[in-house]
Image (cartoon, grey):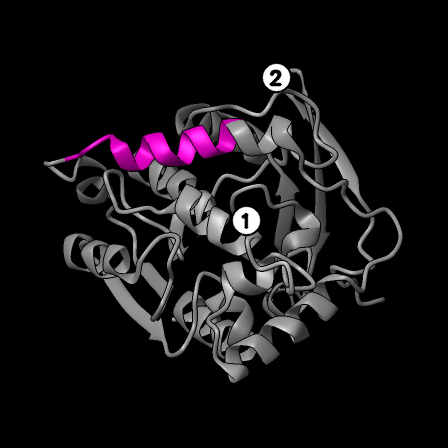
Amino acid sequence: MTTIWLETAPNEFIEASGIKFAYRRLGPREGMPLILLQHFTGTMDSWDPAVVNGLAASRPVIVFDNSGVGQSSGKTPDNVAQMVTDAEQFIAALGFAKVDLLGYSLGGFIAQSVAAKKSGLVRKLILVGTAPQGGEEHLLKVLKEAFSHKEAPDTRLPLFFTSSAASQAAGRAFLERASMRTVDRDPESNKAVSDPQAKALIDWCASKDPENAILNAIDQPVLVVSGSDDTMLPDGNAYFMFKHLKKAQLILYPDSGHGALFQYSTLFVDHVLLFLND
């Protein structure tokens, strides 16, 4: 069987509730599917091939563009609730009755919301660089700071990685891996994506949840992962989720920011697979 990598996987499309979702399927056809939910303005090509390919070595992995993002049709929602509905409709269209979810950053908001519904859809949950509803965010401040670094070849270097030489070197290695796909790449996100997604992210964190209703409703095992110096969604969010979830494990990676899973790609894959296979 020919191995399919993120860099070469064909773009596939499936329609659900009037939206044509773009996705790529990697790994074996059998096994518990792992659905990846992407970060703010991220597309399928914003994932790290080292992470996605590593996870897909032993299980089905699906990356996709939610509504209005990348090659998917529709309008980008400005609220998490609609993003949740769209993601659920995409998963249902694929015919999956039970999945594992990996939610990164904004995608983590979606993953929490889906898991909290107690629909039986989610078996296990990985939350990376994300926040609970009512959590702490510094999106606009961090974006402004990142864009001020005119010397950076890519905004993701100051945005996702710390200023240390080791973290910046890991960031450059990630950027090289993420640029390896040259055919049928997703288009870069523009303001039609970034503006509504920014509103959704900021509103999620501004909407306080004093009873922790979402976290308390999640009964599934959860792996919470964060960088030690995540300036966008600080690591205090990860510790808060760990303390309030029923079955959570917590991993903090040293000298790392919002892109900790890319900086420690091999270790992150090992940790996720250990968690999922347990």
Q: Is residue 5 magenta?
A: no
Q: Earlier in the sequence, mark 1 or mark 2?
A: 2
The circle on residue 35 is 1
Q: Quadrant of the N terminus?
A: bottom right
Q: Residues within 10 Å of mark 2 (few under 14, many from 20)?
A: few
**Amino acid type of disc 1?**
Ile
**Amino acid type of disc 2?**
Ser
Q: Which residue is mark 2?
A: 17
Q: Position of residue 276 (x, y in %)?
A: 43, 65
Q: Position of residue 118 (x, y in %)?
A: 30, 36
In the displayed structure, 198 sits above or below 27; it is: above
Q: Is residue 209 left or right of residue 76?
A: left
In the displayed structure, 215 sits above or below 102; it is: above
Residue 32 seen: yes
Q: Secondary structure at mark 1?
A: strand
Q: Residue furthest bottom?
A: 166
Residue 118 seen: no
Q: Which residues are magenta?
A: 196-209
Picture residue at 38% right of the left edge, 62% below the top: 230
In the displayed structure, 65 sits above or below 271; it is: above
Quadrant assignment, res 19? top right
Q: Residue furthest top?
A: 18
Q: Residues within 10 Å of mark 1 (few under 14, many from 20)?
A: many
Q: Is residue 207 magenta?
A: yes
Picture residue at 49% right of the left edge, 79% below the top: 267
Foreground: 90 or 181? Answer: 181
Q: Position of residue 130 (x, y in %)?
A: 37, 51
State the separation of the CA atoms marked 1 and 2: 19 Å
Q: Main secondary structure of the magenta part?
A: helix
